[in-house]
Amino acid sequence: MMAQYLALKQQAGDCLLFYRMGDFFELFFDDAKIAAQVLDIALTSRGEHGGAPIPMCGVPVHSAEGYLARLIKAGCRVAIAEQVETPEEAKKRGGSKALVARDIVRFVTAGTLTEEALLEPRRANVLAAVCEVRGAIGIAACDISTGRMELEECAPDEMGAALARLGASEVVAPESWGNAPIDCVPRPNRLFGSDEGETRLKAVHGVSTLDGFGQFSRAMLAAAGGLVAYLDHVGRGALPLILPPVAREAGTHMAMDEATRSSLEILVSSSGTRRGSLVEAIDRCVTGAGARLLAEDLSAPLTDTRAINRRLELVSWLHDDPLLRGDIRGILRSLPDVGRALGRVVAGRGSPRDLGQLRDGLSEARRLHDVLRARSDRPGPLDEMLPSLSGHGALCDLYARALVPAPPTERSQGGYIAEGYDAALDELRRVSGNARRAIAALEAKYRDDTGVAALKIRHNGVLGYFIEVPARHADRLMAPESGFTHRQTMAGAVRFNALALHEEASRIAESGGHALAAEEAHFEDLVGHAVRAREAIAATAAALARIDVAAGQAERAAEGGWALPRVVDEPCLEITGGRHPVVEAALAAKGERFVANDCCLHPQDRLWLVGGPNMGGKSTFLRQNALIVLLAQAGGFVPAQAATIGLVDRLFSRVGASDNLARGRSTFMVEMVETAAILSQATERSFVILDEVGRGTSTYDGLSLAWAVAEAIHSINRCRCLFATHYHELSRLAEACDSLSLHHVRAREWKGDLVLLHELAEGPADKSYGLAVARLAGVPAPVIKRAKSVLEKLEKGRAATGGLAAGLDDLPLFAAAIEAAEEKVDALRERLNGLDIDALSPREALDLLYQLKAQANG
Ligand code: ADP
């Protein structure tokens, strides 16, 4: 057995091997140690191997799914080795000692799940493949639970942002690729070939050219090849649902890097969960598919005004008609997850219940279609979606006739094909039903015949049907002429058989077996219908999800009194009465009110420096404006009285210093890496929020960096930017930077207490209120008092020396300073270009080096 195990383990590679033994999946060696720890189950041992006992643990087959879920969550991948023949077959093949043949039937990995129990209903589960082809990165992403597949190409430095957007639960990449993302699954290089990818895609979709699906680059095809090859490997040759690939065009979505995504807490909050995230505050979808699409919309806001307005048109229509919205949401609420049911059915892991879900979902889609079609004022985008909502009439009819109203998840017991669908099946069921009734009648007859009132006819898996009487009455049935034959004597009871019972029981077994086989055949046929219609069904699922998202957005907007944003091409940002959806909800839960604030940026006033005390609401203000931009471009209403959003190509957020010690970088280092990314990537169409740049280092360093960064954003990047800082000294930037203005969050000291008004006002902050905030936070009075006297001393010193920013008056402007530096470089370059090196003596060369160095320094 160990030889068989070890051979399978070799195939399983770094996956844990679930080795089927009877009713258990057993794990051995290191696999057992890992699983025992993750699952918190007993680690035992068995036999020995190489002189040492073999560690082992096991999980029951019937509850394996729950254990699998926990292992996958803990980052493991699992190979399932099943028995592929019965013990009888093994004996026939190799004699009484023969080992039952086993094989790996599938791999279970985070990115390739389809089981309902292992998936989160409101989150997409994405598998991605990444590779590089001649300097271009190809990314293929697929949610196999619904079959959606998307291909894209980007530059190497954009790979991180693209993967962050996808939020894949598993990424595969070529094994010898040096720049592969961390934690990816390495796969043989040869699987990532563009020709191979093209061939595989053509084979999957049964087409001779991919032109009908769109134009795909070499890098995209290579990644697609890697992806399909991995799915093929994981399913051991059985491919899941894969819909035709869609090429994602570069630049059609607002770019956001990983740092921006996590700092804006779009899909998960800083606690690592959905609680407190933007999506949680927005999501009013009534279906899982809607919630998944909303998450996708928020992860990839659009950059095309027309596409944004199409989404807004639908939301707005549903917003203005609460009754219709209520009706639509009522229908959607009862919808099963059509996309995922289809995914399971096509993957060959569907159950009768999944077919029932397709039937119910598709007929509800039809009902929705009829409700919407009756409205003559429906907007264009909805009009285009309508055909996808209907057109499954024949399939629905077939399923309605074929399936019982609530089909089971298990096929083994049968009973899911409806009466009246197949006369032969009905007859088989009638025979076995009659036999069951006959057996019930026999029980009464035998009681009469024997006079034993306690006589029972029972059934178990070993004996089948039998007659049981308490031991003290057994003698009556033991008599040779009684008509009963003895089968088994138990502690308190004796079991018998009788001819009539045996005959009825055989009838049940025979007709039952035939009925099961007939149901199986119908099941395969019904599955075939769904598989053939898979693309149309997936389109219906997609349309339902889009309508749910729009109705949910409309509902959220109505709930919060949100506004329809106006999206324009000019680089402006005019938000009146803006609010932060998450902070507002948190305050509302405590019975507190959120103070709405305006923001107005345009080319002549595009950088706002926001000062004011800690806890005054600076970060909240910065983030709320970024979120409003994001929500608007995702095609939804925004938490404001009114908003005009100039299209943003890239959104950057550097808020708060979050430690990233896991990657071995200090807080300050992370801050600088992220700031560097902004300075190198932000364009005139970008929107940047920067909070407390330079906080992570000494005062002088920090102030200088904040100063230089603000200047660069103003004069070089020229993007729209909100810049929060507690350095008063920065307010002097306003003197030299025309498009920069000063703002602050208001605070007042009232009877010695600090009152934070959370209200934005023009002009610089008057003071920092640091001590007052400390007092508010409960720092003991003696410490505050001592700090006060230290502060007085420092302030006296500052008055005498001109303060931290003394001497900045004669600092040349940022752009001018750079020009001066470049002039110097140019002069050096000219001199170097004019040299005839071969004509120099060693001595002259040395002298020249000294001169050049002096020139560079001078
Ligand atoms: P800062 O960045 O200035 O230190 P924050 O933005 O972190 O301040 O805000 C601190 C707290 O103040 C928030 O957690 C919130 O409870 C409250 N707050 C912020 N903005 C507002 C507002 N506009 N209205 C009401 N409360 C607010």
Image (cartoon, rainbow, N blue to C red):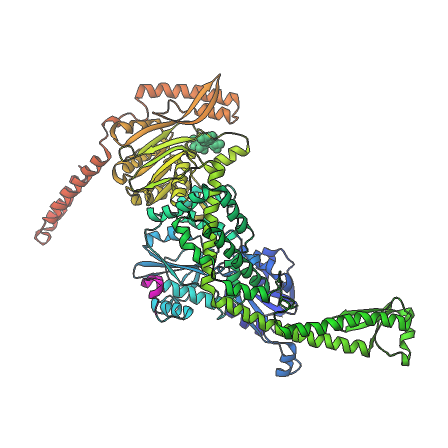
Location of residue 242 by image quarter: bottom left
In the picture provided, is 235 more to the left or to the right than 854? Answer: right
Q: Give the position of the N terminus as an image quadrant.
A: bottom right
Q: In the rendering, at what x and y percent does residue 764 appear?
A: 34, 25
In the picture provided, is 751 more to the left or to the right than 250? Answer: right
**Residue lying farthest to the left in this orientation:** 839
Residue 59 in view (yes/no): yes
Residue for point 54% across, 51% down: 331
Of residue 469 and residue 28, the one placed in the foreground of this image is 469
Q: Give the position of the C terminus as an image quadrant.
A: top left
Q: In the rendering, at what x and y percent does residue 780 appear?
A: 53, 24
Where 723 falls versus 807 (above or below)?
A: below
Residue 461 in view (yes/no): no
Q: In the rendering, at what x and y percent does residue 297 appear?
A: 42, 49
Q: How many marks?
A: 0
Where 587 falls versus 300 (above or below)?
A: above
Residue for point 92% across, 74% down: 476
Residue for point 47% across, 42% down: 321
**Residue lying farthest to the top in this orientation:** 751
In magenta segment, residue 220: yes
Location of residue 69 by image quarter: bottom right
Q: In the rendering, at what x and y percent does residue 525 appear?
A: 54, 71
Residue range (magenta): 209-221
Of residue 503 and residue 384, the one placed in the foreground of this image is 384
